[in-house]
Amino acid sequence: MEARTQLEHTRNIGIMAHIDAGKTTSTERILFYTGVTYKIGEVDEGTATMDWMEQERERGITITSAATTTIWKRFDQPYRVNIIDTPGHVDFTVEVERSLRVLDGAVAIFDAVAGVQPQTETVWRQADKYRVPRLAFVNKMDRVGADFDHCIRSMRQRLSAHPVPLQFPLGKEDSFIGIIDFIEQKVVIWLEDTLGANFEEFPIAKLWDQAFLKDRPEVVAAIKASAISPEFYKEHREKVVEYIAEHDDAILAKYLAERELKPEELRASIRRSTIALKLVPVVAGSAFKNKGIQPLLDAVIDYLPSPLDVPPVEGASLDGTEPLLRRASDDQPFSALAFKIMSDPFVGHLTYIRVYSGVLKAGSYVYNASKCTRERIGRLLRMHANKREEIDA
């Protein structure tokens, strides 16, 4: 039962986007807010944890996929999030494809100014090919020309996707300070002096409370920049809830009868539709300005699948005569896919694997289907970019 609980609370995700959309910057914030790193690494300064190769730090781009693991608490329950940060440059598209093949879910990052870009279309098609559920993070909401609605439209038009905005940015460009959450009906504002680690939350009704606004000029400026009013909020939230209900028969009847759904019902519905590839949840923020990362992590937990939510992996018997299915369980025979090999100057060749079923232990033997031979597993390592942590199983 312990293993099953652990799998339920596991997310295997990738970060994908066009070059310079903010993949590695977002990943660096994830590592900081989850306590993996004590200092935020910056791509432009060559201090990013995930861009560890010398060429990556010199050029400020991701060349090879890097893996890491972190823990994020949601409703007081810790979840393990295994992350692969993929390259955005077109020359390294093969790195993205080999990663998508072993992922359960993905976060697609969009530039709030540019919207969908050429490499976005490429990685989106690759994710479609492997039927990877996605959520979208509209990044760089602080930049001049940032347009959240334009990003949503370009996703519909150029990707043939079904995006559902779960948030609306509070402010834009220099006045961007936080987000309005349609699901929880609350406002989140990040505090500049804590590098975004701390934030203020309050019910949506307070956003138009004149007594509250009297001493909050930055909130007044953000409301004005976003052209938000109580009527605007109500209309947009109703559209979002209706769009969610339309894609899920399980809640459609209740919504039509009551015209309202509880937050937990909405989250469960969005999760079902996301895993079924019917919807793409969309959240907003500015990774560089340390805004929006915590709700993004919440969305990863709430809406992307665990290993138990994805279909069993298909294979064949050793003689190739009969098809076999392996589901995510310790009780099943061991099956895994080696999706990447790297050379390490200290330990030699490193083989990155995705375990689909069973348990792999150091010192055990496995059958290599490509070479038709048995091989002994010497050491097992959990990778954090280029750092190694030895594990038993």
Image (tube, grey):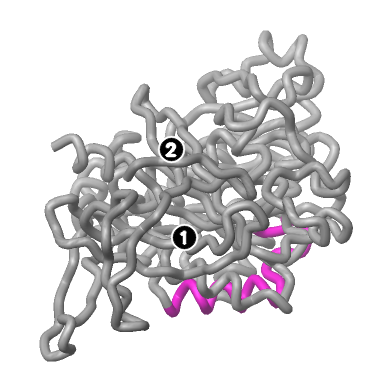
Along the viewing direction, whichever of 320 and 182 lies nearer the viewer: 320
Q: Nearer the viewer, mark 2 or mark 1?
A: 1
The residue nearer to you, when weighing 344 against 269, is 344
Question: Which residue is painted at 51% across and 21% down in the image?
Answer: 203
Q: Secondary structure at mark 2?
A: loop
**Residue at the extreme bottom:** 321
Residue on which disc 2 sits: 183
User: Residue 232's image quarter?
Assistant: top right
Specify few, some or many for label 2: CA neighbours under 10 Å numbering under 14, 14-19, or 20 or more: some
Image coordinates for residue 113, horizontal then vertical, percent:
78, 58
The stretch in magenta equals 110-129
Above-or-below relation of 58 to 375? above
Task: Please report whichever mark, 2 or 1, sits nearer to the chain's N-terminal start.
Answer: 1
Q: Who is closer to the viewer here, 9 or 286?
A: 9
Q: Write the residue at 35% across / 41% down.
A: 392
Does residue 102 appear to the left or right of 2 in the view shown? right
- Amino acid of disc 2: Ile
The N terminus is located in which quarter? top left
Residue 375, given in percent of the width and then of the height, sits at 33, 68
For residue 345, which quarter of the picture?
Answer: bottom right
Q: Residues within 10 Å of mark 1 (few under 14, many from 20)?
A: many
Total numbered labels placed on residues in the image? 2
**Residue, disc 1:** 134
Is 154 rendered above or below residue 300?
below
Q: Nearer the viewer, residue 292 or 389?
A: 389
Residue 217: horizontal and vertical position, in percent?
A: 81, 19
Q: Position of residue 353 (x, y in %)?
A: 42, 62
Q: What is the spatial separation of the Cα atoms under label 2 and label 1, in whole angstroms?
A: 18 Å
Q: Is residue 204 magenta?
A: no
